[in-house]
């Protein structure tokens, strides 16, 4: 819930700067390894928007795949969890270099 609250807060501040009367949509980048369940975020989003200029708006989620880098063999690959075994050399990979993003990308207002 706190993530949805912060997303809407950021959008409301942006809308206020533009003197907007309505938020139509909010677009975010959400990494697969950010630890946020999309369905839960969408559920909380609607209730967070109630009684604000964001009520009725759409939350657009750009899903960013996880990326891992194996320092043992210099292989980069897509990761679906924070700790992976390198598919090329079999070493345990601890360096995640993508997919943890959670940022508001744009706010569409009237």
Image (cartoon, rainbow, N blue to C red):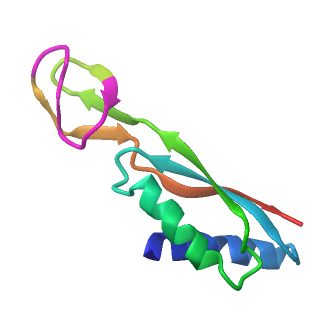
The location of residue 35, given as percent across then percent down, is 33, 55
In this rendering, would 55 be left or right of 21?
left
* Residue bounds of the magenta highlight: 77-90
Q: Residue at x 45, y 54 (%)?
A: 38
- Indicate whether 3 appears above or below 34: below
Q: How many marks?
A: 0
The location of residue 13, given as percent across then percent down, is 71, 77
In this rendering, would 104 be left or right of 42?
right
In this rendering, would 71 be left or right of 23?
left
Is residue 21 magenta-colored? Answer: no
The location of residue 15, given as percent across then percent down, is 79, 73
- Indicate whether 5 appears above or below 92: below
Q: Nearer the viewer, residue 51 or 64?
A: 51
Which quarter of the figure is the C terminus placed in? bottom right
- Indicate whether 102 appears above or below 68: below
Which quarter of the figure is the N terminus placed in? bottom left
Is residue 87 magenta-colored? Answer: yes
């Amino acid at each position: 819930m706190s993530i949805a609250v912060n997303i809407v807060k950021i959008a409301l501040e942006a809308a206020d700067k533009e003197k907007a009367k309505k938020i139509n949509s909010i677009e975010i980048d959400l990494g697969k390894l950010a630890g946020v369940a999309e369905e839960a975020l969408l559920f909380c989003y609607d209730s967070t928007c109630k009684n604000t200029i964001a009520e009725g708006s759409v939350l657009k989620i750009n899903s960013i795949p996880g990326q891992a880098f194996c320092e043992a063999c210099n292989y980069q690959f897509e990761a679906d969890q924070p700790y992976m075994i390198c598919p090329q050399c079999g070493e345990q990979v601890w360096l995640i270099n993508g997919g943890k993003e959670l940022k508001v990308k744009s706010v569409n207002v009237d």
